[in-house]
Amino acid sequence: MSAPLHASTATTEFVTFRLCDQWLGIPVMAVQEVLMPHRITHVPLAAGAVPGLLNLRGQIVTAMDLRAVLHLPPRQPDDEYMNVVVRHDGELFAFMVDDVGDVVPVEPAAIGPAPPTLDGRWRSATAGIVRRERDLLVVMSVPELIRLELVTS
């Protein structure tokens, strides 16, 4: 399980995005950019949630469908999606998400632990839960999302 994000007293900003009906967030410092859909080159025998690679201004980026990583229903072929590009251990990954929301600041005290009843895949990639006025924001760990797919597929 990843380290809690509320270890410091500084406000953290999160890039928010939607998968199905759930809003999730990752630290803005982990995000390189947000992109519209790009042409993805299929890679034979790639991990289940890796539809392939994309070329981002000459850099090779591994596309990861977060719906597949988190065992959510697949998006329909004609459904729109966005890419949230993150850098981890010197590699670029494009997280395919349904929609991208705002960057939101969150006080450390507002981040609670993931409930023990959460599905094991979700719990291992969840760094905390933020209660918002109308919904919950699930704060995700970028390294754990990548590890989930690359290690467990």
Image (cartoon, grey):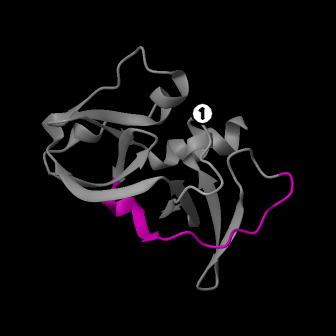
The answer to whether residue 77 of the structure is visible from this angle is yes
The answer to whether residue 89 of the structure is visible from this angle is no
Mark 1: secondary structure: loop
Tell me what residue is drawn at x 49 percent, y 71 percent: 36
The residue at the far right in this view is 44
Residue denoted by label 1: 71
Q: Is residue 111 above or below residue 61?
A: above
* Magenta residue span: 27-45
Q: Nearer the viewer, residue 18 or 44?
A: 18
Tell me what residue is drawn at x 60 percent, y 41 percent: 69
Q: Is residue 6 above or below residue 35?
A: above
Q: Is residue 42 above or below residue 144?
A: below
The residue at the far bottom in this view is 57
Tell me what residue is drawn at x 53 percent, y 56 percent: 95
Q: How many marks?
A: 1
Q: Quadrant of residue 107?
A: top left
- Of the 4 image quadrants, the one containing the C terminus is top right
Other-residue count near label 1 (Cα within 10 Å), few / some / many at <14 / 14–19 / ≥20: few
| Residue 120 coordinates in the image, percent (x, y) | 53, 22
The residue at the far top in this view is 117
